[in-house]
Image: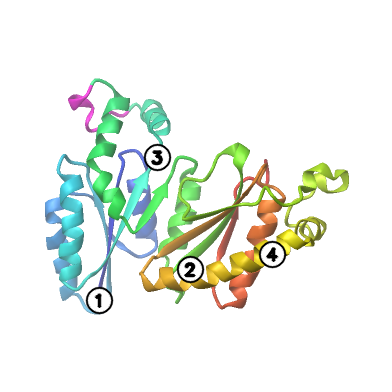
Amino acid sequence: MVEVLLIAGMSGAGRTQVGNTLEDLGWFVIDNMPVELIPKVAELGRFSEGSTRLALVAGTGDDMGAVAPLLSEELRASGASVRTVYLEASTPVLVRRYRDTRRRHPLLDLTASTEAAIDEERRLLAAVRDRADVVIDTSELNIHDLRRKVTDLFSHGEGQSTRVTLVSFGFKHGVPADIDLLFDCRFLPNPYWEEDLRGLTGMDAEVQEYVSNNEIAREFIKRTDALLEMLIPAYQEEGKSVLTIAFGCTGGRHRSVTLAERFAAILRDRGLSPRVRHRDIER
């Protein structure tokens, strides 16, 4: 069985770092792979004994956006298991990364500025992003965060077909970019206005009791539980490899944390192994 990861995305968004992490996880990685050679390399994996895990880090080219989706279909037709991972980041973040590293964007010769080159590359790769199996936004991730995320996604050992991640966050710090479902928890009682609870978080029993022990919270948990009970198997049936569910409140320390922890416990009772990330709990 040949398992192929096609790593594509914006220059400066972390493609090489993802390749390095996959190599440490035991994948055979080829970096800066010309797109026209990808089917040939994947074909070689068919002649090796046992299973083969190939990670092909595609370079950037004018034809990348048009060719990559076709290559993915060609690889699947050959019998390989193929997933496309797309790395992206916001334009201001990419501009800063290029400035800090003093590197030139590969499309800079075709445009008037680094920002224009990034916008042009984003346009060229729009079709790749739209068809990607996994999209990772690295705007707010450092090298260590990205490594942990890739390890969570692609280290083998779990039989769960869809990896579920529950994220808590504060709206005042911005909405996470790489989420699939979002639940706004700001309608629930806010512990921030209780002096005895303000310094605690949703990890504390007192806050959990305050947030959850009321009629509207119980009804929300009941109905959302029923919704996820329907949606998660449907996502699994469609072959979705990653499902990120976010709960947001004002600051990201009380209500959202409480709900993320509550639904993590519910999903564990169903036999899943959700990961939980409290993005803003320390802010």
Q: Earlier in the sequence, mark 3 or mark 2?
A: 3
Residue 231: which numbered mark, if any?
2
Question: Quick one: quadrant of the N terminus?
Answer: bottom left
Q: CA distance from mark 4 to mark 3?
A: 37 Å
Which residue occupies 45% across, 77% down? 159
Corner quadrant of residue 99: top left
Name the foreground residue: 137 vs 181. Answer: 181
Where is mark 4, residue-wise?
Answer: 219
Magenta segment, which residues? Answer: 103-111
Helix, strand or loop at label 3? It is: loop
Helix, strand or loop at label 1? It is: loop
Q: Earlier in the sequence, mark 1 or mark 2?
A: 1
Neighbor class of circle 3 (other Cα within 10 Å; few <14, some 14-19, many 20+) is many
| Amino acid at dot 3 | Ala
Position of residue 250 relative to residue 5, above or below, is above
> Can you tell which of label 2 and label 4 is closer to the viewer?
4
Where is mark 3, residue-wise?
Answer: 89
| Amino acid at dot 4 | Glu
